[in-house]
Image: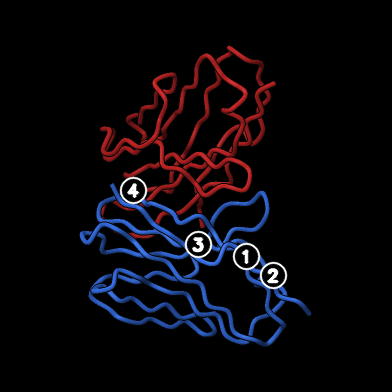
Chain colours: A blue, B red
């Protein structure tokens, strides 16, 4: 089955700095890569996703890049704000069920 | 807009009891997923249904079973509960097309004492 590794497990940045979270996946058949933000005790919420026919996607301060050859994808958050503090999960799928990475706890210091 | 509805939001059970969690997907979403998330863990896929048939199976214990009904709502039945079953249980739904966004419900927090 699919295996997704995510790094780092924790990330602390100063407000206004950029944050980068990286994931690798094992199944070359995976073709859908969403990123979820989860605040403590709440549901995961999709913040951006990318499909395998695209190398990069951007939505305001958030961007995701995908390298299918190397089987890795990354989340980039620019101009971080305290409200960006949360746990971020990457995920991969070739079918219907998502396999999640282990999560990155992002702390944005004011 | 309608979201995924889960009930109950909180549930406390004793060891060896049974529990039933319910999920009402977004209207016209015919795929339902169940995930288990332990404290500080990532969501672990349990099982999914497409058009009322089981479509994928993950790390669901034999003590658990699930089904999707004719109105597309789903129930996760958990028997012989163990302390280790204490977790957040999320249901997510998506349209039938493969690889589309999964919308998560608020979750059910199950505590086994």
Q: Are marks 4 and 1 on the same chain?
A: yes
Numbered disc total: 4
Instruction: Measure how far apart labels 2 and 1 are at the Cα level.
Output: 8 Å
Q: Label 1's element? A: strand
Q: Chain of mark 4?
A: A
Which residue position is annotated with label 3? A36
Q: Residues within 10 Å of mark 3 (few under 14, many from 20)?
A: some
Question: Residue at the spot x=58%, y=34% of the render?
Answer: B7
Q: Does residue A96 lie above or below A8 as drawn?
A: above
Instruction: Measure how far apart labels 2 and 3 are at the Cα level.
Output: 16 Å
Residue B50 location, x and y as percent? 28, 40
Along the line of sight, the residue nearer the viewer: A19 or B103: A19
Q: Residues within 10 Å of mark 2 (few under 14, many from 20)?
A: many
Which residue position is annotated with label 4? A97
Q: Label 2's element? A: strand
Instruction: Measure how far apart labels 4 and 3 are at the Cα level.
Output: 14 Å
**Are circles 2 and 1 on residues that touch, CB within 8 Å?**
yes
Question: Residue at the spot x=54%, y=58% of the render?
Answer: A103
Earlier-in-chain disc, 4 versus 1: 1
Which residue position is annotated with label 1? A10
Residue A52 location, x and y as percent? 25, 71
């Amino acid at each position: 089955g699919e295996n997704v590794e995510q790094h780092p497990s924790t990330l602390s940045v100063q407000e206004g700095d950029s944050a980068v979270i990286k994931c690798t996946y094992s199944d070359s058949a995976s073709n859908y890569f969403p990123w979820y933000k989860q605040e403590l005790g709440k549901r995961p919420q999709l913040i951006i996703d990318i499909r395998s026919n695209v190398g990069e996607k951007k939505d305001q301060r958030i961007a995701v890049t995908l390298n299918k050859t190397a089987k890795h994808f990354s989340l980039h958050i620019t101009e971080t704000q305290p409200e960006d503090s949360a746990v971020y999960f990457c995920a991969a799928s070739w079918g219907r069920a998502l396999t999640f990475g282990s999560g990155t706890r992002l702390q944005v210091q004011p | 807009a309608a979201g995924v509805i889960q009930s109950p939001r909180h549930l406390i059970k004793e060891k060896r009891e049974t529990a039933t969690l319910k999920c009402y997907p977004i209207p016209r979403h015919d795929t339902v997923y169940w995930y288990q998330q332990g404290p500080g863990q990532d969501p672990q896929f349990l099982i999914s249904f497409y058009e009322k048939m089981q479509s994928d199976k993950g790390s669901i214990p034999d003590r658990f079973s699930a089904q999707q009904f004719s109105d597309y709502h789903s129930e996760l039945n958990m028997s012989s509960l163990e302390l280790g079953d204490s977790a957040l249980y999320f249901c997510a739904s998506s349209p039938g097309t493969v690889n589309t966004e999964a919308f998560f419900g608020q979750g059910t927090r199950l505590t086994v004492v």
